[in-house]
Image: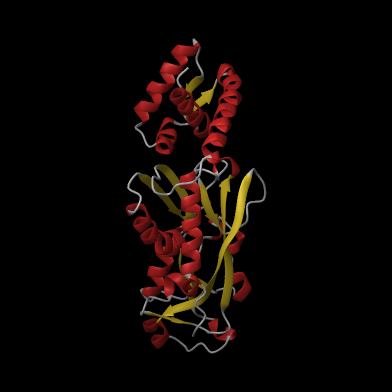
């Protein structure tokens, strides 16, 4: 029985769609379909039922999955027993991260890392939502909250600071702000409350309940651009706002917040050479950007 066909079977069983499995395997979705057809012909029965929302395991497929997973575990054990070598890194590593951190801090540095490993494919999912390890959406996830359960390896990646910002033009044309009470009457920019993907994003509850919002957005990058455009005041990560000469801190020393990033990976793939290399690189990147992440000056 062809192991590659079984590998394709396992990815489709976990992801549920040809497109998702194809992305994980770095192939075209037609290749996944062809591999599954070959496997079904080999075992003499249908392993998936085709439905509108994707592919669902048949009874035969459900019986086969744990056997293939046992084969996968044995293969990973053999691979992890070999000495790690970063010189020949190859394959796909998919990283899920929050939108701002992924875009501003990780993207340029991961691009440089990938250039030194031409056979390695890095997928960066920098998104304004939680990326799920349990759904096989990513291999490594950087999140605002520590995963509560599951067979995963978790580490605290870093802390980062946030502050209240407004554009210099806004501050020049609106009432001065010297204390929290002075925030009354000012316009704010923030997240959409009912679409928050983490309670860690509820900064304003700790500071002030705004009278009005100029804009609410699920995107921190959109919030940043709105603040820079003079639309109002917002809590922004220092790593995003400090490099923008259009912005100034509001209530420096009084409106400061600290949050943490947690990094996690399924225990079953932690020892793969490419995963170890990217995991270590992400930790080194966070450590190297500590000054930017924890910017505390006025």
Considering depth in this image, is 141 or 16 the residue closer to the camera?
141
Question: From the viewer's perspective, is 206 left or right of 79?
Answer: right
Name above or below for residue 128 compared with residue 162: above
**Is residue 27 visible in the rendered structure shown here?**
yes
Q: Position of residue 15 (x, y in %)?
A: 50, 34
Q: Residue at x 37, y 21 (%)?
A: 34
Horizontally, is 23 left or right of 183 in the view? left
291, above or below 180, in the image: above
The answer to whether residue 250 is above or below residue 151 is below
Residue at the farthest top position: 44
Residue 117 in the image, given as x and y percentages of width and height = 35, 50
Is 217 in front, or is 126?
126
The answer to whether any part of residue 52 appears in the image is no
Picture coordinates of residue 118 (x, y %)? 32, 47
In-front residue for pair 18/265: 265
Furthest residue to the front?
A: 83
Depth check, front residue: 220 or 19: 19
Task: Name the residue located 40 percent from the left edge and 22 percent from the top edge.
Answer: 35
Q: Position of residue 203 (x, y in %)?
A: 58, 69
């Amino acid at each position: 029985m062809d192991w590659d066909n079984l590998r394709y079977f396992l990815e489709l069983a976990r992801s549920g769609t040809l497109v998702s499995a194809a992305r994980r395997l770095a192939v075209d979705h037609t290749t996944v379909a062809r591999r599954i057809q070959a496997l079904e012909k080999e075992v003499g029965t249908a392993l998936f039922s085709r439905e509108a929302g994707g592919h669902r395991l048949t009874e035969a497929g459900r019986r086969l999955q744990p056997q293939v997973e046992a084969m996968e575990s044995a293969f990973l054990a053999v691979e992890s027993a070999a000495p790690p070598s970063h010189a020949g890194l190859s394959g796909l590593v998919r990283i899920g991260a929050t939108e701002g951190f992924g875009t501003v801090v990780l993207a340029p540095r991961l691009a440089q890392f990938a250039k030194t490993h031409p056979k390695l494919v890095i997928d960066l999912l920098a998104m304004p939502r939680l990326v799920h390890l349990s759904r096989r959406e990513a291999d490594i996830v950087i999140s605002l909250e520590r995963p509560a359960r599951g067979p995963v390896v978790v580490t605290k990646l870093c802390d980062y600071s946030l502050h209240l910002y407004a554009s210099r033009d806004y501050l020049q044309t609106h009432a001065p702000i010297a204390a929290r009470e002075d925030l009354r009457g000012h316009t704010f920019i923030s997240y959409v409350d009912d679409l928050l993907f983490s309670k860690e994003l509820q900064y304003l509850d700790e500071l002030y309940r705004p009278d009005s919002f100029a804009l609410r957005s699920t995107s921190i990058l959109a919030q940043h651009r709105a603040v820079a455009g003079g639309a109002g005041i917002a809590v922004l990560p220092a790593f995003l706002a400090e490099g923008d000469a259009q912005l100034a801190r509001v209530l420096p020393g009084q409106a400061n917040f600290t949050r943490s990033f947690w990094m996690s990976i399924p225990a079953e793939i932690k020892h793969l050479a490419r995963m170890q290399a990217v995991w270590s690189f992400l930790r080194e990147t966070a450590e190297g950007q500590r000054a930017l992440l924890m910017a505390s000056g006025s």
